[in-house]
Image (spheres, helix red, strand yellow):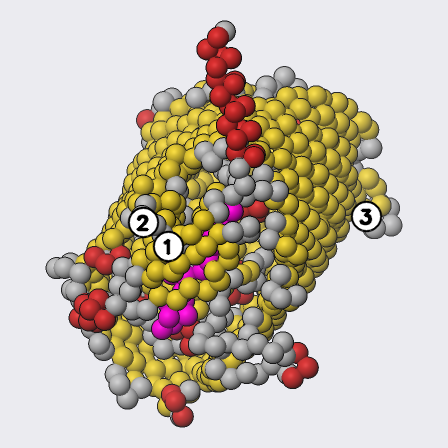
Amino acid sequence: MRKWLWIVGALLVSVLASAQSKTYSIKGVVYEEATEETIVGAGVRLLHQADSLYVAGSSTGTKGQFSLANIAPGKYLLHISFLGMEPYYKEVEVVNKSVNLGKIHLSESVTRLGVLEVRGQATPMTVKQDTIQFNTAAFKMRQGASLEELLRRIPGMEIDEDGKITYNGEAIERIEMDGRSFFGNDPQMATRNLPSDMIKNLQVVDKKSDEAKLTGMSDGEKVKVLNLEIKEDKKRGLLSNLSAGYGTQQRYTANALVNLFNHDARYTIIGELNNIDGVRRGRGEETTRRIGGNYDDLFLNKTLKVNAEAFYNSRDFSVDGKTMTTQLLGGEKANNEAEQYHNFRRDEEVNLNGRLEWNPQESTMLVFEPYFRYNWNKTDNSSQFQTTNRQGIAINDGQSLRTNDGTSYEVNGDLHFRHTFNELGRNVYARLSYRFNGSDGEGLQLSETNFRRSQEKKLRDQQQRSYDRGESGRFRVAYLEPFSKEWALQLMYDANFGRRKSDQSTFNKGATGEYTELDPIYSRGSENSYFTHRILARLRYKLAPRSYLYAGMGVNPSTSHTISTQGGEVTFDKQRTVWNYAPTAILEYRPSDSLQINIRYNGRTSQPSMSQLNPATIVLSPLAQVQGNPDLLPSFSHSVWGSINFNRPMARQSLNMMWGWNLTNNAVAPIQKIDATTGVRQTSYQNISGNQSLFGGFMMSLPMGGASSKWSSFTFGRVRYSRDKGFVNEALNRADVWRPMLSQRVTWSGPWLQATVGGFAMMQQAKNSISKEMDSRTWDFNAFGEAIVTLPFGLSLTSKLTYQDASGYQDQLKRNFWLLDASVSYSFLKEKRGTLQLSGYDLLQQRTTFMRQISLDRITDSEVNGITSYVMLTFSYRFNNMGADVRPSGMNRGQHYGRGYRRH
């Protein structure tokens, strides 16, 4: 007991002492004098003037900023250093207020500059805290190449057939330009229209949530952001890029980009029209129409940041293809499902969003984010299908046609408020948000299904009308109390409410031939409401100047009520109160600028959905039915993620390693029972424990032959393992799936030639516990060689030859092919503003697309048909009025750029 009294007494004394001793802060932003770029990772030390004893230290952040907290009144000497720069010293006196030094410029060291000029090679990849940076100078591109073409050359970066970007398997949620939102809700607007030559660095950033940034308490929630650092000479004045092209197979493209930088303001207009997206990605015919604008500026003495975006998208998508699915039934039993399809979809969407960030004073911040979206869509899908057993005997076959005309909309707003009370960081945070959304649709469902064993035929000729409305709101308040320089506690309360009503009414034809008779089997609806509370405590401990340990525990009681109907009759009415728990632990360890270690643990309770609990049988189609299980239990998952980043910029060496593990107990698993004679699938649900997954990976970038070598190597590898327990035709099965992949590329960079050779190998293996007949192993191989020649008189040649091989797929889908893309361009006119380019894609006409997907109970091979080869002639014109002040006189704030554009 006495021991605890001593501990409590010591804590009280430390708290009282810290509350009574008045301290201040010293902050500033460090820039490179020659380029006006902020310097990341510069060392900052504060020394006593009298004896030069160390007082405090830090390093500059991702925007060059630093802040030294808890500084007592007195006279100090500030020392800032960075490799290749002259050291900076400044006498600083702290009296009765904090000190803001503003801009601090470092000049280049003459000796170091000479060394750097001899090396002359760009470092392909560097790692800075939560940021992986790629120097675009290390990836020579053809004249006029887009940002999307550059992204496809970044190891670990993948762009799927929908244009969605992933890095190391994690989705890129949004795009920023110099740390400011840039068409954040439509990344393709930026990736497909920005020219790659205006970008200095590509940064993949694990960005913390707004709450974590505002409060200083990490919540473990991060999103991957692609930040584009623009070259300094490209962000002063007016920059425009216009292009148009026409080719064989009636291919065409047109793009327009107008970028205006003036003082703190940025104006962007982007337009796009083409029918080559689907062809280039091997996924059918696609016509794209886009136009959008982005505006970013500062007001009220730079205390108000404004970002606004508006764009219109229109897309026609038409694809023909086929799939072959092996439906595993346990043992040696399996059905083969073949389908040929034609899908058409048209989407038109208007999107408006913005962000207002106001700092009326240093301690207070207010952020408001409005959002509006309206969508029109039309679909027309047809297919022919057949199911056979392994002996080739037909089980069912048929055809279907599905159409729909629909609209959807969404309106929401998010308001954040934060106020800091003292230098240690005591603060209060509040968030208020509201969202309203809805959709409507009407279409036809026509199908003919023939059951060959029973000679039964089911016809469906129906009209469906859908209706959906929902709203949700949130209020959150958090208080952070620092007990000392090392310890801080945050308490949070969060309340969420929501309700949703949906209805799908299905009508058969009446006597008049109109769709007027309600079908009770295919008509269903639901109403759901919920109220969730969240009570959370988080503890933060400062291990070192840039290293922290976080631990937290959350309790989430919630109440929900769901009513389900079928054919107008109530089939499910349930009110439920549940408790969820969410422990967290986070380690952020940075012993030096070159080494960073991050480890994160999350525990989470999840409840089954109301549709999974609904015991009523829902008929989805003549071949599919679903019935819920009201006895399902909540699941609990453990998740661990970690990374180690090592970086030596001057040696052009960088290593990034990452790993993760996930285990779920009482996971909700579907149970499918497939009638071997009809092919009808009945699905229910049951809890199962032991599902887990592991992944590990690394990226390594280094020169070959020393830091000054023109040879560089980039290696990327990863392995994923999953153990999925589930049911195959009601029989319990365990599937162990391995997915290793290794990629290597070697590049030689010279003054007029960059040549790259590389490739990858990827394997996917699945082993099942109930039958070896269900096991599979596939291999995918890729090897390529690429050369880019840039001659001084404006001629540029690009060629890439790729060989792709695959094995383990079904014979009729297995394809090995060569792919040759080539282009020649010539730049002319004043300052080489005009470029004429002739490009050929898939010149050997061998490109095809096939893909295998493996799940617990099925293996699906797919292929898309369409034109993949064409030649196109394109003319581009670039206008660059850099350095000019183009703001209208009525908008001038009386402030100019100086030598460069300041980042925010």
Start-end of magenta stretch: 24-40
Return the residue found at the far left: 705
Taking the image as shown, residue 136 lies to the left or right of residue 413, namely left
For the point 83% across and 42% down, the residue is: 517
For the residues marked 1 and 3, what is the alpha-carbon distance in whole angstroms? 84 Å
Residue beneath label 1, please? Answer: 77
Q: Earlier in the sequence, mark 1 or mark 3?
A: 1
Residue 52: mark: 2
Point out the frontmost of discs 1 and 3: 1
Q: Secondary structure at mark 2?
A: loop
The answer to which of 96 and 699 lies nearer the viewer is: 96
Quadrant in the rendering for residue 808: top left
| Residue at screen point 60% across, 64% down | 302
Q: What amino acid type is highlighted by mark number 3?
A: Tyr
Q: Name which quarter of the figure residue 262 lies in.
A: bottom right
What residue is shown with label 3? 515
Dot 1 amino acid type: Leu
Disc 3 element: strand
| Residue type highlighted by circle 2 | Ser
Q: Is residue 507 above or below residue 350?
A: above
Give the CA separation, mark 2 to mark 3. Answer: 88 Å
